[in-house]
Image (cartoon, helix red, strand yellow):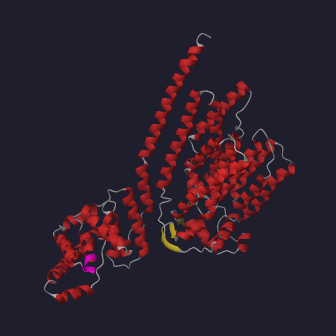
Amino acid sequence: MRFDHLKSLCFSAVVFAMLFIVGFSLSRHKALWTDEFFTQKDSIDSQSYKDILTLQIPDGNKCPLFYLIQKINADLFSCKLSVAHIHGLNIILDARSQVITRIPSNVYMSLALAGIFYYFTRSFSLFTAIYALLTALVSPMVWLYWVEARPYSLWFLLTTAQLLFFCSTVLSPKIKVNKFIYGTHILLVLTTPGSILQISIMAMMLFLKGGYRKWQLVWTWVLPMGIFLVFFFLVPIYKFKSYDFLPIFFEAVMPERLFVYAAYALTAWVLSEKRKRYPANIFFLPVFLLFSISGFLVLFIDLFTQNSQFGFSNRYLVYLAPADILMFSLAGFDLWHWARKNIWVCMNVSIILGGLMVIRGLMTYREILASALYLHPVR
Amino acid sequence: MFFKRPLKLFLFPTVNIILAFFLLSAFFIAGRSVLQTIPFAYISASNYLSPRPMDYFWEVNINQAPIDRDQIRYYRDYYEYLLQVFPSLRDAYGILGYCYYYLGDDARAIDYLEKAIASNPIYPWNYYNLAAMDINKSRYQEAAALLQKLQLLDPQKSLERMFASQFVYAPLLQAGGKDSIGATARHLKILYKASFDLLRILNQMAYRKDLEGLIKKVKLVPYAF
């Protein structure tokens, strides 16, 4: 049962509040690590608004949006970092500054997940929305970057918004032009220059989809590209070691879900052959594939330029996680929808989707536990 | 046509039930194998949380470095976590008792030290630490009883026990490098000598009132090892 706008909004607000409370608790138990601490100290606390807006940011990333919001947040709560204890890579602050520093990231991630929930209640059903929310909650990238006071959760939110706006433009019965995509692209490129790949993919998809005027596509791609070029010449080019690029890729895209996507593509092909129609959400598969290819592209470029001590981190592929979450949710919905007429097939599809969800949940729990991310004490 | 109905009624559900059974079994096995690796995740987490370098207690106890409450708090958190996920590591009770003393929580310190003595009765420092706290609170009889028990312990066995404590004492003692056994043994010798002297003073206090004034002037502090 689809919900109307107001009902969906109310449900999503409740989900947002619950996620924010969870994030609040997580931020109390996660010590800042060196990069987070120095980002906050050197690139936010020590810089004025003018410095940030004129891109005088000591961090490698010169895009100002994240730093600007962090600065406003710190000023709003009059929060200056006071270090309680430094231990190796972990910097334990007093509970107040630790939580306040992490508020914007908590809001971004909670908003992204609530946004997914809203989209699915509005376009599909409450059951599908819960399924999509669970898919997101078992994703390790969500837990790794939920309250990290760096731009990754903002990148996650904007990618989620970009993909959801794209879905809403394509989803039948009413294919429409969504103007919010332009804004999302501008915000994305103001968050990280690494987003140019996904912006280009989306611009290409919108171009192929049709319905957009030329000047609209210019707004969608040319303007972000111009902003990207400005940042590109300012950003230091780091070279990374990435011997283990496949494991890094599969931290953002869950490998076991690829079998579901293959089954989904096969189902789509069978349906198109037999009934001359495609599953409703198959349009998202090329988006997901292109996103994945772009992730590989980043990793491959990196592989051939390695001569540095830095390890390539999964955080540069954080934008793949929302694509994977949405793909799994949409594919799951379509497969279940397709199978529901036959109780036996429906039972097996439910076992596969539920089983994969439970196994991924356990694996994510193990990964987060092993990294001791949220086990730091409160001061 | 003839076969279509039985196929629909019997074969299709049977195949699907077999498939469901197969899928459930596969997920059950996969889930169980993930659950079996959770203890390794706890070990990995404890490695992440462990103080590095782990030499602060060595510096404080052997080289008389000053007390840093933040450092002690960090060690306290680490051993609390260790005990929470591995309750069998009871040697951590003694370290926690030591930590809580310096964090100003005497009630918890006493509680942990009593648990430490109950779980590891051949480790002498726990007796001394508890006795020191008793003396500081003028509970001389209790302190004397503890020091009496300490004197009956075999120092050689105590030393062996300390280095055999793979997850609690051994990593702390390794900070001493090549001389860790020698330095720990020397420190242990001092403990036995000091506790013997203390016991003598406590025993003589019954007929020498001047000793009470003397002992009240002394502020005894616990040691981890």
Residue A202 visible in the snapshot: yes
Q: Nearer the viewer, residue B157 or A31?
A: A31
Task: Specify whether residue A87 is painted magenta.
Answer: no
The x and y percentages for residue A133 are: 61, 47
* Among the 4 quarters of the image, the one containing residue A59: bottom right
The x and y percentages for residue B220 are: 28, 80
Residue displayed at 47% across by 60% down:
A375
B141 left or right, relative to A37:
left
The x and y percentages for residue A357 are: 54, 42
A291 left or right, relative to B195:
right
Residue displayed at 62% across by 38% down:
A332
A142 left or right, relative to B110:
right
Query: Which residue in the rendered view is the most extreme toward the top?
Result: B2
Magenta part of the chain: B133-138
Residue displayed at 69% across by 47% down:
A119
Q: Nearer the viewer, residue A50 or B11?
A: B11
Name the quadrant of the N terminus of chain A: top right
Q: Is residue A254 above or below residue B105?
A: above
